[in-house]
């Protein structure tokens, strides 16, 4: 750690991981409710658990991105953060708002929460991922503005690097597209149309910039490859992401009532969307192969490569699987969608946050890298979570294909009803739950790795030189 | 005459030719001829304007492959339909 | 592309005279993606025409092939101008290079004017993006291409301005080549688009 103010990243990372644990707890509840319908009913209905699971996911990723930014921007700009105090204040505001919202979800029925928070004044609630009460959404905007102001000034006053600029562009885009969460037209088609401007243009647009820049930062630091080379890759990846991802939004407009031409546009452009993820994978593998130094933090490299590979699988391969209109006609909103959503979110965004945490956390705790024992455990946890998630994905894919065969493929009356199909798929869902258990073991191992005693020195003789070079 | 100028004039002539063919005549051979003319023009641009004739082969193959792939696909549809 | 995992890092060691890729490698990757996007659009066009042959034949009757012809000639000429700009800078002719580049930009302007008058006529005749699959493809593909012409013009203007400031020379003119390569790509795409949309139907 070169600048004192980088340390504000720490509370963001810690809180992100706490929320991650919460997300997985609710994932396990959901997985159980899938096979034991009235599990925890009426205390925690499925819809509430689902909302908590997905909202915690988004919020912990946002905490992770913010932490990553606070860590990365001063180092890239070569100056202290404009205002560490503001960063701390916003941390508490965001953490309090997030916690209160989750408590609200769990303590009162959703309709009641809407009433209490005055949803009728500016109705924005009730849509997947955007369930937060309107005041929470306003709070998010305030936090985002303060955050952008703080890091924006730092970037403007300091050294401008491609990593910095790409990251800032991504973050500004994230905030701008979130504004569509306030647009809530009553026509269902219009509502969905712009809902995707938040959801799709986030994960397949501006978040990709955030992902690529954090990945580039970690790789610059751990491999010592020339910045110039890495920046060139970054340009290529960004260009590919934007040219495919923006019009690629059309892959959600096939059957929602939007004009028919989206069948063509969505299919053509989203078919190109795997390219940036493919390039990112080549990029990561290539940089590590060409590394100029062996950074003692091997765990961070593992996360970085794992992230690039799993993101390509989840977004690139599993996304492509159902992105062509004739295929999506049968698979829309099936278990296949869930398979893809899980692997993509985990591979791309959960893993990039863990990659930067893995790199930055030891430095913030006063060492270049954790000792061999802690790293071994961390790397094992990376593998466990990845394998757990791959199994979840495979079982859900099996369930999805089976579901399509039973429920959607048959042309006439022999198609199975929704609930009957659900029962027929129970085997897959049990298997998914078991895989979720494996994933949870990985998560526990990961958390434990932070507490492995660090009596011995980090496994490098020239640790000082390494930090200096980094 | 400069090499580039010659190629430029050649391209203009081929373009007018393909237009006249397409709009003045008919026949089973016509679509394939028009596509073949486009392939020749495209390859001229690739080799002499884009200068891929002297570039690492991978790039020449990729761009020429694109040209012939797309036109070839059109030709298949022309002859099948 | 998959065959070239390390191409991005190996450019520096290529022997200069033997094999020369004009312009920046990153630009070439961008060009390949652009070509892929257009390629998929053309393939979709072929499939759509296969599905609705009558509608496509009827639609083709209504578009203005003459404008397409004129624009092909304009773009080819623009490409020629820009190729001359590259030759000029290689010989150290900074001023000539700038002039050829402006000529290239001018060709883009002419192209855009013709394109818009073509759109104006069609829209006046009552056709638009939503008049059926044929018109969707016609309007979208040509407009998407027009956007690329505009981007190409912006790049050429930037290169011309930098050239005028003396940033390029016989020894160092990679930026000119980079801009030129993009511009030729836009031309190449049109050479395929022209017969498919304006001539064959
Ligand atoms: C990291 C990037 C990505 C993430 C995090 C992600 C996540 C998701 C999620 C959560 C959904 C479900 C949304 C809902 O609730 O309806 C979804 C749907 C979808 N995704 Fe992605 N995705 C990513 C990239 C991609 C890519 C690259 C493609 C295409 C190549 C793709 C294709 C699709 C399609 C077609 C759907 C709609 C499925 C349906 O009709 O039910 N995704 N994605
Ligand atoms: C123990 C592991 C997990 C289990 C058992 C689990 C289970 C579930 C279940 C049952 C749903 C609801 C699906 C439905 O509506 O039918 C869901 C939704 C979702 N989960 Fe998980 N989850 C787990 C971990 C994760 C992780 C690690 C991530 C991402 C990093 C994640 C991201 C999501 C997303 C994005 C959705 C919404 C999907 C959509 O809209 O299609 N989950 N999860
Ligand atoms: Fe999407």
Image: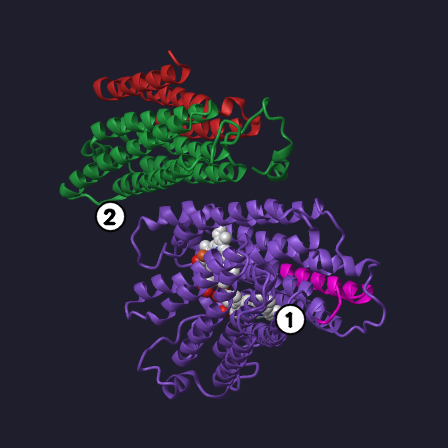
Q: Which mark is residue C130?
A: 2
Q: Is residue A371 magenta?
A: yes
Chain at numbered mark 1: A
Rendered location of residue A82, percent (x, y): 53, 70
Ligand 3 falls in quadrant: bottom left
**Residue found 35% across the figure and 85% down from its top:** A118
Does the magenta-highlighted stretch encompass residue A401?
no
Please identify the dominant SS of the magenta region.
helix
Residue at the spot 50% in from the left edge and 33% down from the top edge: C174
Using the rendered image of the protein, determine whether residue C44 is visible from the camera's viewpoint.
no
Is C130 situated above or below A470? above
- Residue B47 is at least partly visible in this image: yes
Range covered by the magenta-colored residues: A365-392
**Judging from the image, what is the letter of the chain drawn in purple?**
A
Q: Identify the chain drawn in red.
A: B
- Residue A95, given in percent of the width and then of the height, sits at 54, 80
Q: Is residue A67 left or right of residue A323?
A: right
What percent of the width, then of the height, locates residue A318? Answer: 54, 53
């Amino acid at each position: 750690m070169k600048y004192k103010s980088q340390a504000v990243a720490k509370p963001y990372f810690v809180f992100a991981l706490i929320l991650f644990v919460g997300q997985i707890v609710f994932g396990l509840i959901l997985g159980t409710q899938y096979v034991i319908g009235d599990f925890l009913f009426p205390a925690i209905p499925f819809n509430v658990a689902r909302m908590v699971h997905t909202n915690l996911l988004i919020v912990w990723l946002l905490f992770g991105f913010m932490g990553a930014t606070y860590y990365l921007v001063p180092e890239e700009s070569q100056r202290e953060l404009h205002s560490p105090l503001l960063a701390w204040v916003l941390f508490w505001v965001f953490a309090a708002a997030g916690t209160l919202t989750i408590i609200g979800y769990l303590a009162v029925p959703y309709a009641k929460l809407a009433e209490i928070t005055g949803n009728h004044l500016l109705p924005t609630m009730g849509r997947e991922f955007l369930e937060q009460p309107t005041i929470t959404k306003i709070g998010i905007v305030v936090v985002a503005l303060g955050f952008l102001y703080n890091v924006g000034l730092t970037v403007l006053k300091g050294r401008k690097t491609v990593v910095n600029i790409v990251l800032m562009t991504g973050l500004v885009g994230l905030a701008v597209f979130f504004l569509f969460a306030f647009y809530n037209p009553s026509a269902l088609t219009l509502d969905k149309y712009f809902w995707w401007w938040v959801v799709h243009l986030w994960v397949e647009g501006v978040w990709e910039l955030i992902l690529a820049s954090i990945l580039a930062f970690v790789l610059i630091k751990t491999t010592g490859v020339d910045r110039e080379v890495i920046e060139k890759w970054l340009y290529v990846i960004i260009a590919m992401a934007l040219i495919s991802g923006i019009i690629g939004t059309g892959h959600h407009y096939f059957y929602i009532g939007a004009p028919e031409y989206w069948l063509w546009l969505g299919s053509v452009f989203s078919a190109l969307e795997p390219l940036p993820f493919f390039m990112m994978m080549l990029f990561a593998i290539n940089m590590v192969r060409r590394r100029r130094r062996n950074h003692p933090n091997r765990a961070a490299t593992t996360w970085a490569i794992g992230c690039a590979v799993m993101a390509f699988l989840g977004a690139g391969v599993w996304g492509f699987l159902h992105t062509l209109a004739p295929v999506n006609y049968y698979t829309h909103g099936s278990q296949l969608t869930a398979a893809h959503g899980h692997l993509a979110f985990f591979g791309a965004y959960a893993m990039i946050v863990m990659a930067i945490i893995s790199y930055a956390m030891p430095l913030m705790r006063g060492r270049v890298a954790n000792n061999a024992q802690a790293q071994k455990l961390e790397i094992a946890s990376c593998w466990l979570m990845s394998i757990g998630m791959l199994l979840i994905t495979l079982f859900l894919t099996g369930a999805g294909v089976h579901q399509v065969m039973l429920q959607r493929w048959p042309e006439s009356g022999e198609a199975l009803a929704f609930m009957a199909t659900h029962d027929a798929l129970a085997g897959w869902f049990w298997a998914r739950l078991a895989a979720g258990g494996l994933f949870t073991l990985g998560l526990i191992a990961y958390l434990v790795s932070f507490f492995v005693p660090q009596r011995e020195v980090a496994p490098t003789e020239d640790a000082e030189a390494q930090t200096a070079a980094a | 005459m400069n090499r580039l100028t010659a190629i430029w004039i050649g391209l203009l002539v081929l373009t007018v030719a393909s237009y006249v063919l397409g709009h003045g005549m008919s026949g089973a051979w016509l679509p394939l001829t028009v596509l073949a003319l486009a392939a020749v023009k495209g390859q001229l641009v690739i080799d002499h304007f884009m200068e891929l004739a002297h570039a690492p082969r991978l790039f020449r193959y990729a761009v020429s492959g694109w040209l012939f792939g797309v036109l070839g696909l059109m030709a298949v549809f022309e002859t099948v339909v | 592309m998959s065959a070239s995992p390390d191409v991005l890092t190996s450019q520096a060691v290529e022997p200069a005279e033997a094999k020369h890729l004009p312009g920046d490698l990153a630009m070439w990757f961008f060009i390949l993606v652009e070509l892929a996007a257009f390629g998929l659009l053309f393939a979709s066009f072929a499939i759509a025409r296969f599905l609705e042959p009558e509608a496509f034949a009827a639609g083709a009757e209504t578009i203005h092939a003459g404008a397409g012809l004129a624009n092909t000639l304009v773009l080819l000429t623009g490409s020629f101008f820009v190729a001359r700009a590259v030759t000029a800078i290689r010989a150290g002719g900074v001023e000539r290079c700038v002039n050829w580049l402006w000529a290239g930009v001018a060709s883009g302007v002419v192209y855009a004017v013709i394109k818009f008058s073509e759109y104006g006529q069609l829209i006046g005749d009552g056709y638009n993006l939503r008049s059926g699959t044929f018109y969707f493809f016609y309007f979208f593909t040509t407009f998407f291409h027009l956007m690329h012409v505009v981007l190409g013009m912006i790049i050429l203007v930037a290169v011309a301005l930098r050239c005028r400031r003396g940033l390029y020379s016989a020894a160092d003119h990679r930026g000119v080549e980079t801009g030129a390569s993009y511009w030729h790509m836009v031309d190449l795409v049109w050479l395929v688009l022209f017969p498919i949309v304006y001539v064959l139907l």
